[in-house]
């Protein structure tokens, strides 16, 4: 096949005429194309969350297959993917307008195969050094960056009154990957699925076998399928093309930094609790088989996020966010009553229930803050362009670019919570033998968010 015909074939996936705000265009073909891109984007993002949070299920089992890592080292491995994922979200946020949504989704889904394959081999050799696991966990973080580009991409496809719902579905069902992974990983590690690749398993004291490599390898066939689906089924929008220099001015806006803080408190809590909950529960209630229940929290949070966008479109993002932070602060305070003191007492059921509410509110808040971001940045940009005497069309285009860049960048800051929360739990346990110190910090932060949301957005507007 000649180079030019390859070019032509690829360019047919590029849509040059895209007007989602035009009702006739949206009705005739826009909504069908947008839906197809959304429903290929969702499983790609779901798999990204599976890979991103792999270590939350793998770290708990490493010492059972012959490794000798300390609790702090294991917390470190669950926290590192969130660190690299958060940092990489910044460049990823700006990639869709540079390369196109279809190309970037296919590339970013395909490269996740690397850490999965490598981790499967590493866990089978107990002489694998800690430093190798550090590198693999940082590579798993690439998967966490996909969220920024995925959300930016989907925001270009939908008209403004449907953005909250579409971003809620993409983000919420994508977040479901955390829960799917924590449900699937404990099941597949007990089965000899990949024996033909020489996977032998590790014998356990109770006579069973543990095939820890399966937790990583099970995702590889799915990653291959959806990389191909993205390449052949998605579209690049010519209208979303923008250079880095056109996207960067968004960093100068004050609202970007305020919303980053609020998103850190919601999504950061979701991803941080997802990463650290299993390890934390294991340290506080060693008798409970936590991996049987760990998936519930992320599942509830992801469902809340899926519906939270639509709820915010109806009730107003600011109102939902404000109520949400109040509930988060109350339940964070209640958590202290459920913890054992000096290894005595404590109530696992109460501990679990309080955490489920925290997962629920973290998911809801992730959606409502994202809906606020879409509205705020669209409004600021439209007003600025019109004040400069720009056309309606130019205002629309710049608003879409600014919103996508803001969504991506803010999601990067939020993801840092995935590093900070497990690290805080690990450090607090190390210093005092209890996670209470870390929880006090989170409580103060949630109360501060109530005040900020009300002061900046709540008083001026009821929306």
Image (tube, grey):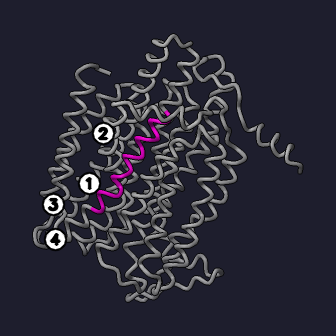
- Looking at the rendered structure, the secondary structure element under dot 3 is helix
Classify residue 233 by image quadrant: top right
Name the residue: 21% across, 59% down.
351
Q: Nearer the viewer, mark 1 or mark 2?
A: 2
Badge 4 or badge 2: first in the primary sequence:
2
User: Is tag 1's residue or tag 2's residue first in the polypeptide sequence?
Assistant: 2
Q: Nearer the viewer, mark 3 or mark 1?
A: 3
Name the disc covering residue 355, or none. 1
Label disc, if present, on residue 436 of the rendered structure: 3
Q: Position of residue 100 (x, y in %)?
A: 64, 40
Left or right, residue 350 beside residue 267: left
Q: Which residues are magenta?
A: 404-423
Contact (Cβ within 8 Å) of mark 1 with mark 2: no
Residue 278: image x %, image y %? 32, 65
Q: Earlier in the sequence, mark 3 or mark 2?
A: 2
What's the distance in space between the residues labelled 3 and 2, CA to CA? Answer: 23 Å
> Do the residues bearing badges 3 and 1 touch, measured as CB atoms within 8 Å?
no
User: Which residue is at the front of the view, 408 or 167?
Assistant: 408
Q: Which residue is mark 4?
A: 433
Q: Residues within 10 Å of mark 2 (few under 14, many from 20)?
A: many
Give the spatial CA distance, label 4 vs label 2. 30 Å
Look at the numbered discs 1 and 4 and tell me whether their residues touch, using CB distance below 8 Å: no
Tag 3 near tag 4, CB within 8 Å: no
Residue ID for mark 2:
262
Describe the element under mark 4 as helix, strand or loop: loop
């Amino acid at each position: 096949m000649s180079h030019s015909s390859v070019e032509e074939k690829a360019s047919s996936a590029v849509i040059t005429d895209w007007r989602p705000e035009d009702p006739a265009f949206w009705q005739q073909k826009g909504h069908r194309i947008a839906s197809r891109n959304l429903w290929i984007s969702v499983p790609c993002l779901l798999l990204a969350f599976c890979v991103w949070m792999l270590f939350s299920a793998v770290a708990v089992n490493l010492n059972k297959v012959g490794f000798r890592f300390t609790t702090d080292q294991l917390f470190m491995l669950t926290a590192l993917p969130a660190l690299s994922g958060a940092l990489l979200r910044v460049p990823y946020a700006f990639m869709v307008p540079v390369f196109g949504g279809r190309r970037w989704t296919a590339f970013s889904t395909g490269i996740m195969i690397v850490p999965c394959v490598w981790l499967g081999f590493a866990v089978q050799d107990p002489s694998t050094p800690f430093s190798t696991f550090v590198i693999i966990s940082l590579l798993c973080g690439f998967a966490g960056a996909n969220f920024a580009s995925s959300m930016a991409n989907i925001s270009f496809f939908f008209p403004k009154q449907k953005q909250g719902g579409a971003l809620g579905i993409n983000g919420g069902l994508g977040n479901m990957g955390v829960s799917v992974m924590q449900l699937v990983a404990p099941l597949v590690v007990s089965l000899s699925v990949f024996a033909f690749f020489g996977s032998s398993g590790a014998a356990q004291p109770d006579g069973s076998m543990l095939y820890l490599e399966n937790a990583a390898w099970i995702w590889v066939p799915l990653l291959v399928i959806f990389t191909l689906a993205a390449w052949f089924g998605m579209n690049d929008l010519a209208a979303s093309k923008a250079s880095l220099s056109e996207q960067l001015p968004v960093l100068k806006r004050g609202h970007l930094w305020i919303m980053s803080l609020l998103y850190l408190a919601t999504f950061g809590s979701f991803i941080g609790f997802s990463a650290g909950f299993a390890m934390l529960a294991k340290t506080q209630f060693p008798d409970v088989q936590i991996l049987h229940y760990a998936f519930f929290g992320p599942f509830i949070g992801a469902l809340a996020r899926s519906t939270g966008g639509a709820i915010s479109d109806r009730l107003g993002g600011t109102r939902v966010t404000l109520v949400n932070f109040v509930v988060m602060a109350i339940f964070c305070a209640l958590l202290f009553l459920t913890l054992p003191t000096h290894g005595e007492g404590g109530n696992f059921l109460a501990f679990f229930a309080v955490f489920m509410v925290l997962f629920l509110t973290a998911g809801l808040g992730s959606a409502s803050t994202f809906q606020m971001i879409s509205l705020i940045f669209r409004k600021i940009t439209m007003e600025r362009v019109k004040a400069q005497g720009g056309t309606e069309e130019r205002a629309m285009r710049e608003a879409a670019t600014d919103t996508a860049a803001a969504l991506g960048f803010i999601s990067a800051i939020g993801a840092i919570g995935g590093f900070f929360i497990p690290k805080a739990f690990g450090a607090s346990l190390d210093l005092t033998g209890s996670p209470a110190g870390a929880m006090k910090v989170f409580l103060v932060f949630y109360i501060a968010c109530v005040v900020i949301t009300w002061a900046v957005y709540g008083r001026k507007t009821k929306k």
